[in-house]
Amino acid sequence: MAADPEADTLELPPVPNFGHGRPRWAARRIHPRRIGRGHQLLTQRLKTWVLDKPPARLAGLGLGALLTLRAANTEPRLLAAAAGAYAIAAWRAGRPVPPTEDDLKRRVIEGVHALMGDQPAVFLRDVYDALQARPVAAHLDDARLRAVLVHCGITIHKQVRIGGRTGRSGIKRTDLETLLSPAPVDTPSDGVDADQGAGEGAVDKP
C-alpha cells in the first residue's frame, strides 16, 4: 500500500532491507541476499563456537567433515539433502529485523550529515532537493520534509554560513554530531561514599 501524501499523521517511510519492505516485487528480487546474509551469520557463529574451545572442537569439526564426505561419496542424495537443509537454515538466520523508529531517525540524520561533506553546514533547500530526488520521499513537499527533520530532532537555523554564502536557512554539522554521539553515562558524585546512601547524614541529629 503506497504512502498517502495527504495523510494527517507524520510517519517515517520504511526502508527495505533484505526482502522486508516495499514494493513487493523488489523484495522478491533481493531474496538471494537474505541467504547470503544468513550464511555469513552462520559462519560467524561457527567460528565463535570453535574459538571457545579450539582443540576439542576443531577435532570434532574435522571428524564431522570427514564423515560427511564419506557419506556424500556413497549416498549423493544425502549431500543434496544437507545442502537444502543448510540453505533453509541460512534463510531463517538471515531473517530481516524491521528497523525501529529510532533507527529510521538515525538514518535520516546520517543522510543529512553525509550531504554536508566537509562543510560546516548545509542549506535546507539542498536537503529538500536531495530527499525529493529519492523515490521514498518524492511525494513529500517542503513542509512535510521539514516536519520529518524536526521529528528527527534536527535543529533548523534561520541563517547559516557556508563559505561566503549566508542569509539562508540550514542545518549545522555540530547539531547533527550531537545527535549522532552516544548518550553520556551518569556517574555517581564524588561526595557520596560507596557504602553510604545519598540521603544519609543529610539531616542533623537533634
Image (spheres, rainbow, N blue to C red):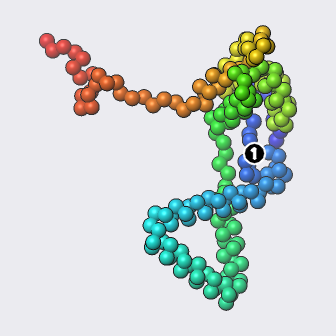
Amino acid residing under circle 1: Pro
Residue highlighted by disc 1: 16
Q: Write the residue at 79% across / 54% down.
A: 30
Q: Point out residue 15 in the picture as x, y percentages from the top left corner.
A: 74, 41
Residue extending furthest toward the bottom: 74
* Picture quadrant of residue 203: top left
Q: Write the residue at 45% across / 73% down.
A: 56
Q: Write the residue at 69% across / 21% down.
A: 120
Disc 1 on helix, strand or loop? loop
User: Few, some or many C-alpha atoms within 10 Å of disc 1 (few <14, some 14-19, many ≥20)?
Assistant: some
Left or right of 52 on screen, residue 140: right
- Residue 108 visible in this rendered orientation of the protein: no
* Picture quadrant of residue 68: bottom right
| Quadrant position of the C terminus in the picture | top left
- Residue 186 visible in this rendered orientation of the protein: yes
Q: Point out residue 197 in the picture as x, y percentages from the top left corner.
A: 27, 27
Pick the residue in front: 199 or 130: 130
Pick the residue in front: 178 or 101: 178
Left or right of 205 on screen, residue 62: right
Compared to 142, does 83 lie above or below?
Answer: below
Q: Point out residue 149 in the picture as x, y percentages from the top left corner.
A: 71, 24
Q: Write the residue at 63% across / 86% down.
A: 71
Figure disc tally: 1
Q: Point out residue 191 in the picture as x, y percentages from the top left corner.
A: 29, 22
Residue extending furthest toward the top: 167
